[in-house]
Amino acid sequence: MNQKLKKGKSTDDLMQHIRDNHNTNISGSKQKQELLNMGYYHGYKALRFIKERRNDQKYSDFEQIKSLYDFDHNLKRIFYPTLIHVETSLKNRLVDLLVTNRDPSIEYVYNNMLIDYKRNEPGDRKYRKYLNRRLALRNKIDETIAYHYGKGNPIISHFFHNSKPVPLWAYFEVISFGEFGNFMYCLDRDYKIEFAKKLQIHHTGMNQNGRIIENMIFALTSLRNAVMHNSIIFDCRFNNDSQSSQIKGYIENMTGVTNIQFKNIEDFLVLIIFLLKQLDATATELKRIIHEFEESVKLLEGQIPNSSFFQILGSDVNNKLNQVKEYVSKN
């Protein structure tokens, strides 16, 4: 016997479902439009829980869900331009370091600079690990360049059509932030440390392996991807908890902000503010970003239960924001 086809619910039906099954008040044309704007499945259902679906918050009024939607939207509005700025500035500065007075082609850089694996004995575990990562990057380089040539990218096409090697800067134009992190991972330690020194990020006690910047890049990659794909970010569900203790301790040491764990969104703000400051953003600009974040936090605090608020943002969120403001105000 054929199963009876289950029909999709109309928005009115979904509102009735929310009232009956979620015990959440929702009614009227205004809230109907708000539900349509956020989407029932992508928005409403995703906003009801914190980090994990089993952590459902049982909000009693749809306006509480709407306040989370607005908070998440405001965070993306704050983070989008800052992440783009960090990514672009880091790429441009690394190009400047690696190609000045050298062959600028990606082939030369790959063969002569992406050789961190050689610091280990051939055949041992770390040698194989780092060499495999380098070989995977080689495949990704070829795949990325071929993809963008096939799509008619004018920059990549120009070099192929003129029988010229693709320069590093052109490759950086078309790669993702995560792929840039993999590039940094394979870069020889001496270049990593030189790059960190140029950005005044190197620390002899916390960056002996030179990996501080790549670890910061990897910490921000999941956030960047979530922002770009309009996924929920307010509760850091994008985070894979892989941030190294190296950058947690380093950011605390350099900024004076305590208890950096990257489990709450304010910790990612602190990392971004630190990088922007090292990339010569003005104190005025940094204070504006912090103020926008702080205002969004204050607005949310008055709209949802305290128990939910402090699961989303740590109980020390206000202390962290005061500490990062003090850091920005220092010369």
Image: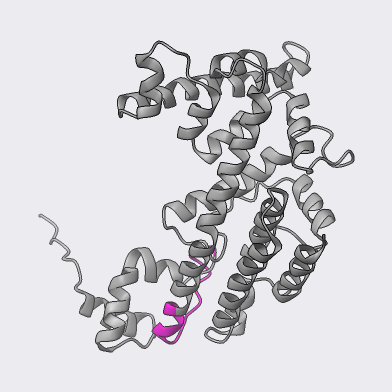
Residue 264 visible in rendering: no
Answer left or right for 164 relative to 246.
Answer: left
- Determine the residue located farthest toward the left in the rendered image: 1
Residue, x 48% and y 53% (percent of image)? Answer: 226
Is 232 magenta? The answer is no
- Determine the residue located farthest toward the right in the rendered image: 205
Answer left or right for 29 relative to 143.
Answer: left
Q: Colour mode?
A: one colour
Residue, x 80% and y 50% (percent of image)? Answer: 250
Residue, x 10% and y 55% (percent of image)? Answer: 2
Residue 107 visible in rendering: yes
Main secondary-structure element of the magenta-colored stretch: loop
Occupied quadrant, residue 16: bottom left
Q: Is residue 61 above or below residue 150?
A: below
**Residue 52 location, x and y as percent?**
52, 63
Residue, x 60% and y 21% (percent of image)? Answer: 134
Q: Is residue 247 above or below residue 162?
A: below
Figure quadrant of the N terminus: bottom left
- The count of marks equals 0
Nearer to the camera, 264 or 297: 297
Nearer to the camera, 136 or 291: 291
Occupied quadrant, residue 260: bottom right
Q: Which residues are magenta?
A: 51-66
**Residue 160 location, x and y as percent?**
38, 16
Is 59 magenta? The answer is yes
**Residue 109 location, x and y as percent?**
61, 18
Q: Is residue 320 above or below residue 156?
A: below
Figure quadrant of the C terminus: bottom right
**Residue 82 location, x and y as percent?**
57, 55
Nearer to the camera, 136 or 148: 148
